[in-house]
Image (spheres, rainbow, N blue to C red):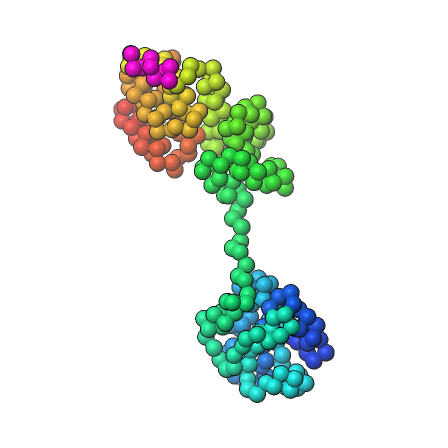
Amino acid sequence: MTQPAPYIFDATTADFDQSVIENSFHKPVLVDFWAEWCAPCKALMPMLQQIAESYQGELLLAKVDCDAEQDIVARFGIRSLPTVVLFKDGQPVDGFAGAQPESAVRKMLEPHVQMPPPAAADPLEQAEALFSEGRIGDAEAVLKELLGEDNSNAKALILYGRCLAERGELGEAQAVLDAVKSDEHKAALAGAKAQLTFLRQAADLPEVADLKARLAQNPQDDEAAYQLAVQQLSRQQYEAALDGLLKLFIRNRGYSEGLPHKTLLQVFDLLGNDHPLVTTYRRRLFAALY
């Protein structure tokens, strides 16, 4: 019979002390005493193998053919089959005789065996989640490791460029984004470059408080309205920026050769088509256009 995994094996009289007793000082070892003629044994064995596999090496499963290994049967006083014994630190610590449901077996194992942690998330998905939470440094650390293994991953490069831009490393961010040659993520790349543009523009603009003061005195101050939207974009205040840009477009769509319209489209690229703000403001822009 083929073995499903290296932590599931046959134990014999010759190797029992090493494969079960010694191993149990490192990992718990579940020993399944079975025989070819025992129908309940054959029903139980696949379930025990499945349980062992679910522990991904944190639990060893040793199978003892009682017809062939009479010395082990006598040593542990096995009287009925199937019998299952859990060894830990060189000693039997729990077990059962007869067929059992999977839930009962797992409950018996629970105090003795640690379930392995869930598989780590895809590194890129992890970085995207960290970035969206504003944990830029953590996202950057994940991306550096990922790009160290594959520096041609366009999606990772784009997100890394955005991290650098958020930290004010605008020149380095530009170099990273310029290195992206794949056409597969055009919208994401355009969005990242738009973010870089907004951050560069914002660095040369008046402070937000000054712009708001100008607009309080004159709500028709188109320059102040546009500059405030750029400052908001640089701070990821997207809803406020989109609202301001749309109002400016409606009021003066020709401002600076249609700049509000162009900027709205850049923000749509930045956020992506699936973003709820993009859905809302694309519809509002369409209504304003037509």
Q: Quadrant of residue 266?
A: top left
Determine the residue located farthest toward the right in the rendered image: 14
Q: Compared with residue 37, is residue 202 higher up or lower down, i.e. above or below? A: above
**Number of numbered discs overlaid on the protein picture:** 0
Residue 109 visible, this orientation: yes
Which percent across, then down, holds residue 229?
Answer: 38, 21
In front of the other: 92 or 45: 92
Magenta span main SS: helix
Which percent across, then down, holds residue 68?
Answer: 66, 84
Q: Is residue 240 left or right of residue 87?
A: left
Q: If the image is split into quadrants, where does the N terminus sit?
A: bottom right
Which percent across, then down, holds residue 175?
Answer: 59, 26
Which percent across, then down, holds residue 205?
Answer: 44, 15
Q: Quadrant of residue 287?
A: top left
Q: Write the start and end of the magenta stretch as one range.
A: 209-217
Q: Compared with residue 139, is residue 243 higher up or lower down, i.e. above or below? A: above
Q: If the image is split into quadrants, where does the C terminus sit?
A: top left
